[in-house]
Amino acid sequence: MNHIEFSVIRLRALWLGNWDAPEFLAEVAYLYDQIVLTGTHEPIIDMGMKLMIPFAEVGSAVENAMEWKYISAPKRGSWGGAMTNKARKVLGQPPIKTASKASDKRKSEG
């Protein structure tokens, strides 16, 4: 079983629960992020197909995760947002340092 399949199983188990729960939001963010990384132009549809859940519900869950800042808004010219460090923290993953934050830190140290 790969990480996407594991996430699908976990998210299906959480689907009928509280959509504002950090565990649910983080799991939505993780699966969405992984699907976006495949290069798809339709991440909501692909996510719905993996979960076997109506696309409208998946879209609502992703929108909710974006509102709670577990998924960043899509950057201009991209097809989807990315999982934020807030979601990584809930899932026990290390934070990702962005290039702009790293360069700002170097500037302040120099």
Image: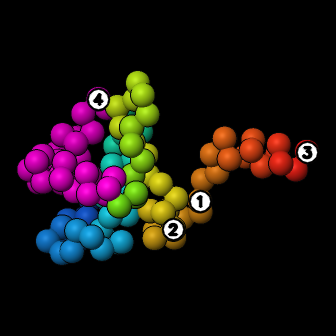
Front residue of this view, candidates 11 and 5: 11
Q: Is residue 6 visible?
A: no
Residue 86 appears left or right of 40: right
Q: Residue at x 60, y 53 (%)?
A: 96
Q: Residue at x 33, y 53 (%)?
A: 66
Write down the residue under mark 1. 95
Distance in Å between CA atoms under marks 4 and 2 = 27 Å
Write down the residue under mark 2. 89
What is the magenta segment's predominant secondary structure?
A: helix
Write down the residue under mark 3. 110
Residue 73 appears left or right of 11: right
Write down the residue under mark 4. 41
Distance in Å between CA atoms under marks 1 and 2 = 7 Å
Q: Residues within 10 Å of mark 2 (few under 14, many from 20)?
A: few
Sequence-earlier tag: 2 or 3: 2
Question: Foreground mark, 2 or 3?
Answer: 3
Q: Secondary structure at mark 2?
A: helix
CB within 8 Å, label 2 to label 3? no
Percent x, y of residue 31: 34, 53
Distance in Å between CA atoms under marks 4 and 1 = 26 Å
What span is in magenta? 40-67
* Residue 17 sits in quarter: bottom left
Sequence-earlier tag: 3 or 4: 4
Percent x, y of residue 108: 83, 48
Residue type marked 4: His
* Residue 57 sits in quarter: bottom left
* Residue 110 sits in quarter: top right
Front residue of this view, candidates 15 and 22: 22
In the rendered image, residue 94 lying in the magenta stretch gets the answer: no
